[in-house]
Amino acid sequence: MSYPVKVIAGLIGTALFLIFIGELSRSISHGFAGFWGGLPFMVIVIVVGLMAVYDYWEECVRRPKK
């Protein structure tokens, strides 16, 4: 896969994933569980989101050394 296609496809996929888990976390925290009930899930979502962004950077953006 060419570099520009890899960057764009990875960005779209990572963005959709982050939007999905972010809104899921917001929904849980603002709904039945309340803020304190949703806090552990929110922390997990933040950590997983940071790992997804790091993986996108490593796999799609950073060019391999020759």
Image (tube, rainbow, N blue to C red):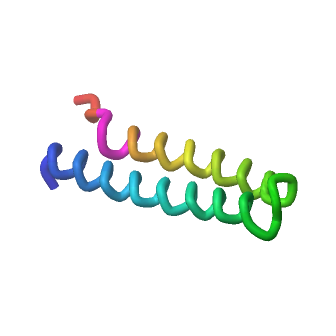
Q: Residue furthest top?
A: 65
Residue 6 % position (x, y) = 22, 50
* Residue sitting nearer the eye, 63 or 53: 53
Residue 24 sits above or below residue 63 on the image: below
Q: Write the residue at 45% across / 46% down.
A: 55
Q: Quadrant of the N terminus?
A: bottom left
Q: Residue furthest bottom?
A: 32
Q: Write the residue at 78% across / 58% down.
A: 38
Q: Residue furthest front?
A: 31
So how many labels did they put on this image? 0
Q: Write the residue at 72% across / 59% down.
A: 30
Residue 48 % position (x, y) = 61, 51
Rendering quarter of residue 27: bottom right
- Image side of residue 31 versus residue 62, left or right: right
Give the residues drawn in magenta, as a range.
58-62
Residue 64 sits above or below residue 28 on the image: above
* Residue sitting nearer the eye, 56 or 30: 30
Q: Write the residue at 65% across / 46% down.
A: 47
Q: Quadrant of the C terminus?
A: top left
60 drawn magenta:
yes
- Image side of residue 45 versus residue 35, left or right: left
Residue 12 sits above or below residue 7 on the image: below
Residue 9 % position (x, y) = 25, 55
Residue 3 % position (x, y) = 17, 44
61 drawn magenta:
yes
Overall secondary structure of the magenta section: helix
